[in-house]
Image: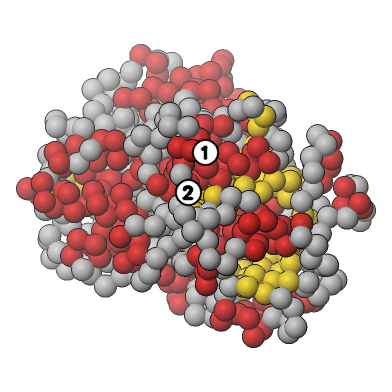
Amino acid sequence: MRLPITGIGAVASIGRDVDEVFGSLCAGRGGLGPMRGFDHELYNGRQLFEIDDRSEPGADRTLRATGFLLDAVGQAAADAGLGDDLSGIPVLVGTGLRELRSAELWWRDGAPFGADRLHFGTALRERFGTADTLTVSNACSASLYTLALGADMLALGEADTVVVAGVDAITESMHGLADRVQPDPPTALRTLDVNRKGTILGDGAAAVVLRREDLRWPGGRLWGRLRGVGMTCDAKHPTAPDREQVAEAMRQAHRHAGTRPGDIDMVMLHGTGTPLNDLVEITAYGEVFGDAAGGPVVTGIKPMTGHTSGSAGLLSLVVTLQTMATGKVPPLVNLDDPIEEAAGIRLVRGQEAKHEVSLAQVHGFGFGGINAVAIVEGA
Amino acid sequence: MITVTGVGVAMPGADSAAALATARNPEGTVEPAAVLGKKGLRYKDRATQLGLCAAQRVLTDAGLLRDGEPTVDGSRTAVLVSSNLGNVDTVCRVTRTIAEEGTHGVSPMDTPNASSNIIASEIAIRFGLKGPNLTLCNGPASGLDAVRWGAALLRSDRADHVVVVGVEPDNEIVRGLVGGPVVDGGAALVLERAEAAEARGATVRAVVGAHTRGPDVAGNIAELAETEPEPPAAWFAPAAAAPALPAGRPGRDLTATWGELSGALGVVQCAAAIGALDAGADGPVWLVAGTDTDDGVATLVLRRPTPAAAEPALR
């Protein structure tokens, strides 16, 4: 499988389009700041990676996630030369938190909101005219799961073009429940650092346009090709990850792609900065890559974007495509003292690295033990 | 060819496909402890408990669970849950607690339930199902979408068995959001490729026929009529969709009996359709979820299994 990716889009705390996001990442510029939508007095942790689109601090509003999604999908569709009319084109959205932030504001403050906008189909139909949409609520691996569904749809010949997207806006319930068990909250997100203290949430959205590989070139830019996606479930614990099935997702991705770990030039980590995720992820990586573990450069974007939940995997993939196009690899900022288990691995630290990347592996793991790994090659 | 090899029903006043197809004034509530035993239910939200009930029944019905033990390798079993309202109560309640007491007032036991995929992940954990695990929260058509994507997972060889579950809980918060009572129940199906079903000697309850998704009911029905060789013997659809369906065929709007079904609707319709097929419906059953006022409409056909249905598809 080599499905052309012909358009990309992204929004995050560090940029309102793909170029801004990538520019910030390469410059080592993160988006962590004082939280703008929630009451500081109610929380221990008062910093988040938010998209700054509220009219005034402390005044939140409904449908922010929907807005991020429409921005990212609009960017990707324009980039692919599809324009604003996506009627007949499936749009598959992965999300952890849907429009649950709007439901919170409805229940707590009486903000106008109805069940018809909990999922994103209503807004996507209004804006892009498509009635074949899917909202998959698959926690933090959601958008790589929808990437797999989109790829399968093209492979089965059920569509010629698919838009795959991911989105999340931080909810108070998710931030608050994390805050409850972190009286001493993390002041930075430090993937793989011995002193990492946990994750910090972020707002974000990303989108890609995928095409069938056997069609005449349809226009848009060729950013790269999707080779395969693996997806597994731990079936062990609702919140703690399990090495065995994380590793299996990597192996499955390679089976789908027809590639081997030794072929990979770069790994884009899930890297949430929680003690357990990073340990499980890097040991699973070591297990699958074996002697090849020292080959690829290994990095991640969450220290600068925050944990953007359901959009995280696809955001990592969009950044990967930009790395392939430019040869610039964003660094893992805040990584001062890597954990022992990461010894011998080529971590990108401090500042951007120059590296030719033609095949990369992108990770997304989530609550519920759901794991997805994508393999993508450069144009 | 994709087949249905199991049906599980966990609805108020109906615990089987037969009861579902005929019930008119169902009474009672689903009691998860009576189905699953009390162990392990504490801290699980209502939607998750309902989903576990439907899953246990469907796995048993399909012969994938015998005396509480799995009969197949769980790594090739996918789980696909459809629920729009599942964890809305937890999310809203926690937010109000934070506003009133700060975060020290919330319970860490709510953390897993704040993630909308909790139903699917708990089903995977309880029954050891390690294949693709998906939660669709896709509005009124979500339940039929789940069957469509379950079939896609099989066609793509992502799994050998797919457990499709549709459930919605009833509580003060979701009633407010949808403007009326919600079903507080759901249903489940097991989907398999015909060859896989035959290989393990499973009973085929129905064959999955054509599927459509589009902007309006009439357009979807017209497309269905073009692809489906036979007119429907019966249908299940929202009342607003009834005028677009072929006249003179028995049909029902299940929400008239059970209230808002939301993301459970399509799966419950499939279970009711199998009840109708078991009762002798003389031809395929057409299903419609979503109406012209929603963001999309999905349709699906379930056909009566024929002796030929057990054979590998001839193409």
Residue B239 at x, y = what percent?
57, 79
Vertical relation: A104 (above or below) A279? below
Residue nearest the observer in this picture, A173 or B12: B12
Look at 31% across and 70% down and name the residue there. Answer: A113
Q: Is residue A280 left or right of residue B210?
A: left
Q: What residue would you read off at disc 1?
A: B35
Instruction: Using the numbered discs, state the Cα–Cα distance from disc 1 to disc 2 in whole angstroms.
Output: 9 Å
Q: Secondary structure at mark 1?
A: helix
* Nearer to the camera, B151 or B230: B230
Question: Please, is residue B225 above or below residue B154 in the view?
Answer: below
Q: Amino acid at mark 2?
A: Val
- The mark nearer the N terminus, 1 or 2, is 2
Residue at 53% over, 66% down: B25
Q: Check contact, mark 1 vs mark 2: CB within 8 A.
A: yes
* In this picture, residue A169 sits left or right of residue A267: left
Figure label count: 2
Q: Chain of mark 1?
A: B
- With B186 as the anchor, is A177 left or right in this view? left
Crowd class of label 1 (few under 14; some 14 to 19; many from 20; radius 10 Å): some
Q: Judge by depth and name the residue closer to the eye, B185 or B118.
A: B185
Q: Position of residue B148 (x, y in %)?
A: 65, 57
Q: Quadrant of residue B171?
A: bottom left
Are labels 1 and 2 assigned to the same chain? Answer: yes
Badge 2 crowding class, 10 Å Cα cut-off, few under 14, some 14 to 19, many 20 or more, is: many
Label for residue B30?
2
Which residue is painted at 64% across and 63% down in the image?
B22
**Residue A358 x, y percent position in the rendering:** 57, 39
Residue A182 in which image quadrant? top left
Up the image or down, A231 lies above or below B182; here it is: above
